[in-house]
Amino acid sequence: MRVPDPILKQNPHNVQPPREKVLEVAIGRAVRAFRKRQAITVAELSAATGLSSGMLSKIENGNTSPSLTTLQALANALSVPLSAFFRGFEDSRRAVHTRAGAGVETARAGTRAGHEYTLLGHIGANTSGVIVEPYLITLTSTSDIFPTFQHDGIETIYMLEGAVDYRHGDEVYPLRAGDTLHFEADAPHGPEGLVELPARYLSIISYAQET
DNA sequence: TCACCTGCACCGCTTCTAGT
DNA sequence: ACTAGAAGCGGTGCAGGTGA
């Protein structure tokens, strides 16, 4: 399946720019994030800081290195400490490595149906604004069938073994090993028919983190 | 149509560097 | 050590693009 290119904005092969540019970009992102959080426009921030909107655009896009005076004006206008602009640059990035069979068994909503949920990793509040929960789900003969999961976000299912008929809204999709189902999770969804057991699949749920 | 944002051309100040 | 020209950088203003 080919998806029209304009939809895909991320480049998985993107290479980091030189470090000095990263600092400017990190500062710019921080400024924009604080501005958006306070729901003010570039023009309003321009009036509050005495900087032109063009200059603010350059700063937010990492196209210039603002002076300390400028950063102080921004910090005052946004009511944040000066150091807040550097956190995105200084913070380390987290990674979670879960070895085979070492995931955390969780009591998610589906557990009551006999479904085995293993959480493969978790990163809580983070700089991307998105929470991602990867689960390994195993359905055995004891698993009940009820297509009533419904929650915020986007979910991706990748079948590892076995086969199920998976309902999403009004549609039922026959999933076999190697199949993928990618869907909006606020519609009722879940395994409706256990065709070949045991069935195992990866379920990756993504949703916006609370601010 | 309009608000918002971006990018480009340009200005002025500061710093660097070479010549004396 | 002093000076003058060059280069770099922070900043402004405005035209044009974009999306609601």
Image: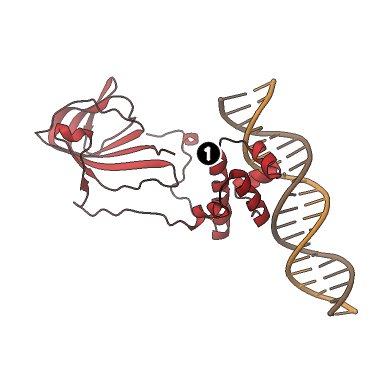
Chain colours: A red, B orange, C brown
Tell me residue A49's x, y (percent): 68, 44
Name the element at disc 1. helix
A149 up-or-down from A51: above or below: above
Return the residue found at the far left. Answer: A141
Of C4 and A13, nearer the camera is: C4
Q: Which amino acid does label 1 sit on?
A: Arg
Of A35 and A92, nearer the camera is: A35
The quadrant the C terminus of chain A occupies is top left
Of A58 and A42, nearer the camera is: A42
Residue B13 is drawn in which quadrant?
bottom right
Tell me residue A95's x, y (percent): 35, 54
Residue B18 is drawn in which quadrant?
bottom right
Compared across the picture, whether A193 is left or right of A34 comes to left
Tell me residue A98's x, y (percent): 26, 53
What residue do we see at 60% from left, 46% from top? A60
Tell me residue A112's x, y (percent): 16, 33
Of A100 and B2, nearer the camera is: B2
What residue do we see at 69% from left, 43% from top? A54
The residue wearing badge 1 is: A37
What residue do we see at 31% from left, 47% from top? A122
